[in-house]
């Protein structure tokens, strides 16, 4: 399918929330619209099974020393651990399972592209679109704002009982669950094992340098050895002392979405103080002062004075590698 350039639109994904993002019109908007419906069906099935829904807010993209597939592994491990700790009455929505940085998420987007192509009597090539018009942070945040807020009623997030923001102790549990005695050995052993078994990871942490999406680095070759050492240092630093929702653009926006939802719920006569959505960090409920305070925006468009130009959006080029299983999920193979 030959695609025309997609315009970026700025707006509020949910009219009741005064949070704006920039997203693509055109094919990306249609694909993410299908994805919203798919995720909402997962929520409705969990609710039909009498589950309490909890949203897991966590880093996913490669940023600040982190690596996307490692972030996906941490999110999956944390969701499984929390399900075991909280018990069978809870269902955790893990966003890593739905974004293209994971094989599951990539397969689902390919599935939507296949179905949309049938509707339009054409072929939609997700790889080609990612090259010509890579997604921006607002494409995902438009989707997640709708998933978190829309509830078939007043759109005040009434499907969710709590948000759980990934914390340093959750990341520490991931790196130490295989028997490491401390964080240093846990992160270093993980790095060594992943370097041996994951070709993309090995390529990213080797010379010549590549970008997170696999494209060659534009850095001069003479500067690459020092840049590689810094990349390895940043990886260790990120996962040993950072690697939480605090350092995630998406999590910052999700915190503000939660804060905005609760402000509206407190003021609404059908909800009130007792029906706020709970927030958790470090396994504990967030204190009242923190829960009611907004934080700096991530991908959200900041409030700006008249005449001030909207900042350029953050491009998200990285996807998981396609495998036979991904293609089967995408309906490309039986």
Image (spheres, grey):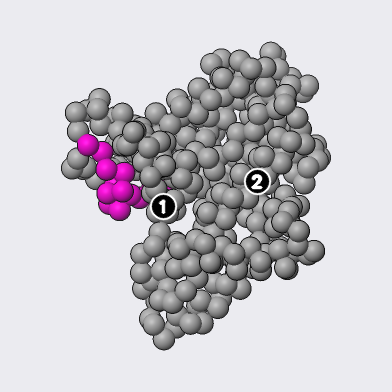
The C terminus lies in quadrant: top left
**Boundaries of the magenta span:** 123-138
Residue indicated by mark 2:
77
- Say whether residue 111 is magenta: no
Residue at 72% across / 49% down in the picture? 170
Residue indicated by mark 1:
321
- Ranked by sequence position, the earlier of labels 1 and 2 is 2
- Say whether residue 124 is magenta: yes
Residue at 25% across / 25% down in the picture? 119
The x, y position of residue 108, in whole percent, is 42, 36
From mark 1 to mark 2, how far is it between C-alphas?
20 Å
Examine the rendered structure and indicate whether residue 30 appears above or below residue 323: above
Q: Nearer the viewer, residue 139 or 124?
A: 124
Q: Do the residues bearing badges 1 and 2 touch, measured as CB atoms within 8 Å?
A: no
Q: Residue furthest front?
A: 334
The x, y position of residue 29, in whole percent, is 36, 35
The x, y position of residue 279, in whole percent, is 73, 36
Residue at 42% across / 65% down in the picture? 211
Say which quarter of the image contains residue 94: top right
């Amino acid at each position: 399918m030959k695609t025309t350039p997609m315009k970026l639109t700025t707006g509020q994904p949910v009219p009741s929330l005064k949070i704006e993002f920039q997203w693509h019109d055109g094919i990306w908007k249609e694909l993410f619209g299908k994805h919203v419906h798919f995720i909402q069906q997962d929520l409705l099935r969990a609710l039909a099974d009498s589950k309490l829904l909890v949203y897991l807010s966590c880093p996913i993209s490669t940023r600040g020393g982190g690596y996307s597939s490692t972030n996906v592994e941490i999110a999956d491990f944390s969701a499984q651990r929390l399900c075991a700790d909280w018990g069978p009455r809870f269902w955790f929505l893990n966003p890593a399972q739905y974004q293209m940085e994971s094989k599951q998420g990539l397969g689902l987007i390919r599935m939507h592209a296949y179905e949309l192509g049938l509707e339009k009597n054409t072929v939609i090539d997700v790889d080609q679109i990612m090259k010509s018009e890579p997604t921006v942070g607002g494409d995902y945040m438009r989707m997640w704002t709708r998933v978190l807020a829309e509830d078939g009623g007043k759109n005040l997030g009434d499907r969710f009982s709590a948000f759980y923001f990934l914390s340093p102790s959750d990341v520490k549990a991931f790196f130490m669950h295989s028997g490491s005695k401390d964080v240093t050995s846990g992160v270093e052993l993980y790095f060594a094992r992943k370097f041996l078994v994951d070709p993309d990871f090995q390529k990213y942490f080797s010379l010549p340098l590549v970008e997170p999406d696999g494209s060659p680095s534009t850095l001069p070759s003479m500067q690459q050895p020092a840049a590689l050492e810094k990349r390895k240092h940043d990886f260790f630093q990120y996962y040993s002392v950072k690697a939480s929702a605090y350092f995630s653009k998406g999590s910052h926006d999700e915190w503000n979405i939660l804060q905005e939802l609760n402000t509206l719920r407190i003021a609404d006569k059908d909800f009130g103080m007792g029906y706020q959505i709970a927030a958790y960090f470090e396994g504990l409920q967030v204190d009242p002062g923190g829960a009611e305070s907004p934080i700096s925006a991530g991908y959200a468009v900041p409030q700006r004075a008249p005449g001030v130009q909207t900042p350029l959006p953050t491009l998200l080029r990285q996807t998981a590698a396609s495998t036979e299983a991904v293609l089967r999920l995408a309906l490309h193979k039986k």
